[in-house]
Amino acid sequence: MSQMETRGETQNLTLVQAVRDGLRDEMREDERVLVMGEDVGKNGGVFRATEGLYDEFGGDRVIDTPLAESGIVGTAIGMAAYGMRPVAEMQFMGFIYPAFDQIVSHAARLRTRSRGRFTCPMVVRAPYGGGIRAPEHHSESTEAFFTHHPGLKVVIPSTPYDTKGLLISAIRDPDPVIFLEPKLIYRAFREAVPDEPYEVPIGEATVRREGEDVSVFTYGAMTRPTLEAAERLEDEVSVEVVDLRTVSPLDEGTILESFEKTGRAAVVHEAPKTGGLAGEITATIQEEALLYQEAPVKRITGFDTPFPLYALEDYYLPEATRIVEGIREVAEF
Amino acid sequence: MSQMETRGETQNLTLVQAVRDGLRDEMREDERVLVMGEDVGKNGGVFRATEGLYDEFGGDRVIDTPLAESGIVGTAIGMAAYGMRPVAEMQFMGFIYPAFDQIVSHAARLRTRSRGRFTCPMVVRAPYGGGIRAPEHHSESTEAFFTHHPGLKVVIPSTPYDTKGLLISAIRDPDPVIFLEPKLIYRAFREAVPDEPYEVPIGEATVRREGEDVSVFTYGAMTRPTLEAAERLEDEVSVEVVDLRTVSPLDEGTILESFEKTGRAAVVHEAPKTGGLAGEITATIQEEALLYQEAPVKRITGFDTPFPLYALEDYYLPEATRIVEGIREVAEF
Amino acid sequence: MSVLQRDSGEQIQVLSENGQVTDESQLPDLTEDELVEMYRYMKLARHFDQRAVSLQRQGRMGTYPPLSGQEGAQIASAFALDDEDWLFPSYREHGASLVRGLSLKRTLLYWMGHEAGNAIPEEANIFTVSVPIATQVCHATGAAWASKLQGGDKAFICHFGDGATSEGDFHEGLNFAGVFDTPNVFFCNNNQWAISVPRERQTASETLAQKAEAYGFEGVQVDGMDPLAVYEVTKRAVEKAKDPGEGELRPTLIEAVQYRFGAHTTADDPSVYREEEEVEQWKAKDPIPRMETFLLENGYLDTEGVEAIEESVKEEVAEAIDEAESVTRPEPEEIFKHVYEGMPERLREQAAEFEALRETYGDDAFLEGH
Amino acid sequence: MSVLQRDSGEQIQVLSENGQVTDESQLPDLTEDELVEMYRYMKLARHFDQRAVSLQRQGRMGTYPPLSGQEGAQIASAFALDDEDWLFPSYREHGASLVRGLSLKRTLLYWMGHEAGNAIPEEANIFTVSVPIATQVCHATGAAWASKLQGGDKAFICHFGDGATSEGDFHEGLNFAGVFDTPNVFFCNNNQWAISVPRERQTASETLAQKAEAYGFEGVQVDGMDPLAVYEVTKRAVEKAKDPGEGELRPTLIEAVQYRFGAHTTADDPSVYREEEEVEQWKAKDPIPRMETFLLENGYLDTEGVEAIEESVKEEVAEAIDEAESVTRPEPEEIFKHVYEGMPERLREQAAEFEALRETYGDDAFLEGH
Ligand SMILES: Cc1ncc(C[n+]2csc(CCOP(=O)(O)OP(=O)(O)O)c2C)c(N)n1
Ligand SMILES: Cc1ncc(C[n+]2csc(CCOP(=O)(O)OP(=O)(O)O)c2C)c(N)n1
Ligand SMILES: [Mg+2]
Ligand SMILES: [Mg+2]
């Protein structure tokens, strides 16, 4: 996949392994980095994202905390302000809300409030999204809550290579980063990932597939069905697929460049339609490039309903069929 | 102002008095209704929105709670499920976040989760918005957090008449309603408000000023500067001002009807631009009415920054000058 | 405010690990039939649990949280309620919910991913399962408070784990209960682990019961694998909730010390974080043989009785599984229902759009992906 | 775990309400100069407070939270810190912050709505003011934890009110402190009121100090209007944070019992919810005359000294007000600064667009509206 640097040694890793690899590399490079959260220590995380770290770095740097999300993020803020680089795990995105106040009222505002005297270089990691037959509250994708709040960055990788590079960038970032991991594809495929630490820059989208007729903007776990839909449509419509990778701040340059070429677009995400990122992207497009626009931007998203229990989750999630249909609608408008 | 029913006795009330009037009427009508929150009892609320209720209804129905927003909303959910109609006050919108989990994970989902066996007929009231020279965290308008979550309704009145009618509708609503009160105009003006209880329906926008050239969608405290801007532009541009009143669910019918007439639009709100309601409204317009669109929809909003301390707040808030300029841009495109 | 039975040496216990009565004075006032019924429920819960785990293994059910080891606390605490009382469960209370009238079929359906499993029947006073830890504590306080304001005379029991005591909502819910003197019983299933995090890592306080000190009401620690002690302690708390003594507050925090024999959920591998030895030690306290010995030795039950119960619980579980598995996948329109009382326009459009697509492409088009 | 001085009768006190030493054994080890300095700080804080309130009345400042009555707790607790220790204040700690090196000018600027007031100078170990109640408790625990991990030897004091103890973040922050044994002093300014909500409505526990029981570390109740007692208790807690005894945990919860003489903020009218009589009762405990009597009677200070101090604090406050008022309104571009280390493109555009508008229309166009 595009800008991959694969000089030097590489390993074939899954996305979740790339998370661990990124954490381990940064912990080796920078002793201020520590990992904290529920079950991240001995257990290695409920998805094994922190496996082996406890053994390598010990309990002072890979910290099993009490079950208290506000406490985790709140103490991590204190740590970050005091010179550490905490990476706090929220076990599932659906359990991030008890920490919402600490994230929006403090992590996001400490720099502003203190005019730069205190900063909050921390990462809040959380697996997000549906499709793994999990219980209630385990399938959320509410990234739009965080993209609306100034002071936060929000990153969502879709490949193992990007995962490691973006996570390292997030840890090195001087500001708080919400790092959302598409757990549906934690183990879906492997990719060559350099052994050495490297950065994939925050704030840059990437074109996963070039096309001429319709631009489709997506991210995270929806990148794969979107690419699949593009392939299915190969003989009909030339689809460009842009993987946003960072959803705050958005890479307007890449979005507009693609759109100005195609004049038609769709946005695909799992989150509910109303108030989701698709609306923001659509608004940006028409603000900056209305004169190029040849069809309404189609929002192919989760429904405006709570995420259903898993017997129905396949219907909830946008998949290739809905995406194909949506793109066709845009192409044929 | 439009659909005002003023038969019967009326009183000239400010917006905050209309809040109190609505609460009192519903408490008289329905003994399941109770008011709870920090300082709502003897003190009558820090804005005097519940003044006199404690004396009239006593401490069992006008309840001073401990200082704990999650506890307030969480216990109110239990009460609502158990047959009461609690109206919980959050002292300022900036202090609603500790209750965010209870609101999005429970209030919004109880009906879905239990297939209608349990419901959550509660109102969460909070004063929102800037302009009153208040300290940090006292000037937020983060309605977009709540409009993105299925299962909630979000109401923001802009006049005393609507305030009473919408609040009564919210209390009678079978589902949870976030009721945001524009504190900047709590006492800005008076209006005839019927003594009798009445409903202003949730989900219906209203046209505050008719016009032909540009539609401006707004709500809450921004309605007044928007009307002012429209007046200033009188000789130049014929501006239609739509007061949304309910921001979730949006009244798409009224929005589209206005837009199809003018073909040009702006949205005005205090909240930060990115991820704010203006984006959602813009996306909806281009989805449903692209062929009518003659100019980009202009978002005239707060900046993508935390709300500044009050020495700078006047610069942050959209006011008539910025609105005039934005409308002109739309008209001249 | 007295806090009873502060440390483990002082836990309330009625039956020893061998099923011998250690404290006659605390023997609950239960008939033979009731004692046998409690035992049968425990057996039923245990067997259900084993079958549920194997259903998950066979791909017939999603992630499931087992309860084995915790039957004593679950069954006895639910048993101590009066008919009109309410239960606010966490996600692991299949046993307690069963006693209170939630069928095994519904519990299975829920973990099979059907919303219908959570539609508590009107006649059962059980709140829906709460997955976000400790959040239900506030709901239980609120409901109890409402009942008190309505002049009701009911108790509201709320179950949660040791891990839950670290959450802010535990604190806020109990604090409200103290201030508004609500008829609550806060029942902490301290099973020593919150997934992989041991009890000692959860808090530095010696017991969880002593946390009641912060809220001004009573905290009690009980041997949670002793069904008779659990029953007795809960019963007293329920009574106090309804009719507190002079100067006493209604709420109680009960810490039921126990152990989860199995994994946290079927997605968990406990061998990564705990020793088999520890599990074995706690298995010696297994509530079921303990209760069985008590019943046999007191002549309330004989070995045939035991066998008959074993047979009957097997049948009952098998039947529940058959019933649950014969329920067909819900229709996708269920997704759009019950979001609000009425369906907003936009939702109606989304449902219609989706239905149209489904008609065009057929169901399989949507199911293949994942 | 011992919880000292559980109820009000057992509060730690060194000076009686009349300024007489009641407990020689607890007299802190302070020099004459230090004692006088503490007294001067208290006078300075009181005078500052009176002037700040009147600035607000005159429209020269926004909403302001007064501290009168709480000088004893604020000044003495800050005084008990060593230079390298850290202070995590709530919004009312102008006195404590002053002792720790935050100028009155900055405090004024902050309440005049200038971000600059919150830019703590590099040399002052003070965290920025936290407005959302109790949230700073977690920050203080995190910073103390980081310091401990870094091998530091500092104590971290965190101030909050009685109302704050009801918030989930209080619970989570103290619980983490217990579990990770962090060098924290949690200093609760129990001033009897959280705006209009009295202490009894905040929690049913008899004291706030006993809430430490839930976290496994020590809780102490002290007469918060007795500066010597506050100093002594805080000093001991600071020492324990750095060097706990065998088997002791580092954190302490101190409940300093005191009273807010004035309104909650200048926006509040306390006559609506409390009796003047109550205020008068507490005024008898005023820390300032108490300390003054002690100093005078022990010959550490004479009446000329008192007068000289009165003069000098007036001057100091007047100067700070002049300085603060001579600071011009910040430039609007300040809004866009410090949101991130770098400025994202979209923010740059917004800033530029706004600047252009301002050039066209002039400043007044934006300021008139409100
Ligand atoms: C707010 C929240 N955070 C995290 C989780 C994930 N989670 C599910 S169960 C669990 C451990 C719960 O431990 P405990 O309270 O002791 O209950 P037990 O499972 O042992 O019965 C965790 C962390 C959750 N469900 N909710
Ligand atoms: C999370 C939150 N909720 C509500 C408020 C509004 N508020 C400001 S001060 C206050 C009372 C605080 O009381 P207490 O903790 O006793 O401190 P005191 O003001 O008495 O010093 C309230 C409710 C807030 N700042 N933060
Ligand atoms: Mg547990
Ligand atoms: Mg107070």
Image (tube, coloured by chain):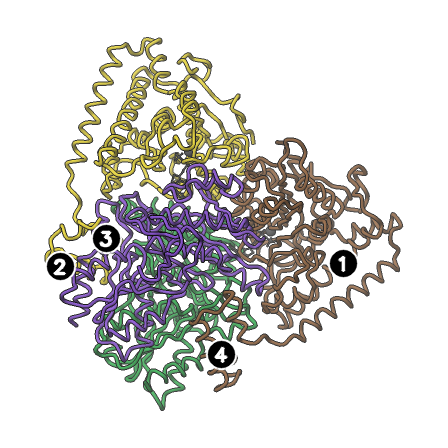
Chain colours: A purple, B green, C yellow, D brown
* Both marks 3 and 1 on one chain: no
Residue C356 is labelled as: 2
Residue appearing at x 41%, y 81% in the figure? B228
Q: CA distance from mark 2 to mark 3?
A: 15 Å
User: For mark 4, does the 10 Å Cα neighbourhood hold few (<14), some (14 to 19), or many (20 or more) residues?
Assistant: some
Q: Residue A262 location, x and y as percent?
A: 24, 73
- Label 4 CB, ligand 2: below 8 Å? no
- Rendered view: B284 above or below D154: below
Q: Residue A210 location, x and y as percent?
A: 25, 67
Residue D43 is labelled as: 1
Q: State the residue position of label 3.
A: A316
Nearest to the eye among marks 4 and 2: give it: 2
Q: Name which residue type carries label 4.
A: Gly
Q: Name which residue type carries label 1.
A: Lys
User: For mark 3, does the 10 Å Cα neighbourhood hold few (<14), some (14 to 19), or many (20 or more) residues?
Assistant: many
- Helix, strand or loop status at disc 1: helix
Q: State the residue position of label 4.
A: D369
The quarter of the picture where the N terminus of chain A appears is: bottom left
